[in-house]
Amino acid sequence: EIKRRLREAAAASAAAEERSTQERQAVLTQAVVATEDELWRVQSALIKGQAWTLQSTSAAAADPTASSAEPVRKFKWATSLDATPVFDLASALPRENLFDVGWGPSTSAVMRSSNGSLGVFFVNTGKGAVVLKGSRSLAAEAFAGLLSARLGIPSPRWRIMSTASREGSVMLARLEHLDPSHFAATALSGQAYIFVNSFIPGQNLSQFTAETSHEFFGPDGAPHAAGLDLLRQLGRIMALDVLLNNGDRLPLVWENRGNAGNIIVARTSVGAKLYSIDTQIFPITDEHEGKLDQYLTKVITLLDALVATGATAELPQFAAVRTKLLEFLHYDVGLQGSLAMQQGFLDVAGTARESSLTQFELDHWRELLRGVSNDLVGLDAVVPDFVMAVWSAFAAHGSS
């Protein structure tokens, strides 16, 4: 059995070396990165070959305290079932550099998230955690991430990885080694491209209890200053959602049940911060037979009411959000909480008139994504004209 395994290992090593020789000069990883400090950059970097050899674990020496009658332990191939490292969400810290991960032996643990139909996996890389995510709407999420960064609304940093690239192959092999069920490698290998996201240490709103809500927001119905700041941040996220028609999160101008899991609260050195995750564009085009005009009318009605009342009266749309938050958080944000959300929304809408966001910029983002691959999933949903139509409504009606 040992000889058979050694022959298989030698054959696999030879095949890997042959692939390395053929691919070393040509394999590129194209990635688009969005951060809070820089809107985007495109990196085409040669993935440098790394020496990967099959390693076996030598037999443990016989216990010197054991009797001489005990047989010496024989060689045993180590498997992923012998010791499965555990990813610890409570202690994990984000990896700063999303490039040059390596996916070597320092990549020591993987855990599946309960969110994400195509698989979302937390991975400990040795220098911090990253999140690997498959998506059927990858381009639509990437475009939303660029807009989020452009507006200064916190969201995870990210890049796009080809699973067929040399880096992708090494990553999948490492995940298969770490995960005895092979679920992570199987789920992600079915995607041509995946996200490598920054890990955000925190809690999503669906995990909040009444006690957690009181800690972050303050007394029921009367948020403290830090709580009002969080709710103002939430208003900014809702403005982003309106620009993208991302109606999954909160029922502001949509009729939906909401999804509190797509908002993360993270502690920072300057206080708590809200992050929008899983955001994407759902464009409405002229092909929808008047649906775009209906949507823009809803948006303009909301903007006109916000400008007219400012932060002095709770609007019905935000009262509906307040009710939904009561369901999610087991906590009433109160009138002042609603007014804080309204002010946050106006913070974004009010900048549209003087903003430099242009059609050219949005079109350029689409071309960047097309440059990754014409077949990038979700690319059809990247319709800059839709965002610019809503942004124009913000500019015309979002300030007095």
Image (tube, rainbow, N blue to C red):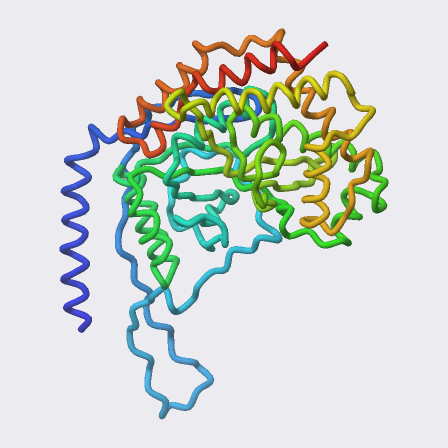
Q: Nearer the viewer, residue 395 or 42?
A: 395
Residue at image coords 72%, 40%: 322
Q: Nearer the viewer, residue 254 or 115?
A: 254
Residue at image coords 73%, 34%: 231
Residue 121: horizontal and vertical position, in percent? 45, 49
Image quadrant in which you'd find residue 67: bottom left
148 sits left or right of 386 in the view: right
Residue at image coords 35%, 18%: 367
223 sits left or right of 352 in the view: right
Residue 43: horizontal and vertical position, in percent? 37, 23
Q: Nearer the viewer, residue 21 or 300?
A: 300
Residue at image coords 61%, 36%: 275
- Please say if 122 is above or below 232: below
Quadrant location of the N terminus in the rendered image: bottom left
Residue 321: horizontal and vertical position, in percent? 68, 38
- Please say if 177 is above or below 202: below
Does any portion of residue 123 appear in the rendered image?
Answer: no
Quadrant location of the C terminus in the rendered image: top right
Residue 273: horizontal and vertical position, in percent? 68, 35
Does any portion of residue 128 appear in the rendered image?
Answer: yes
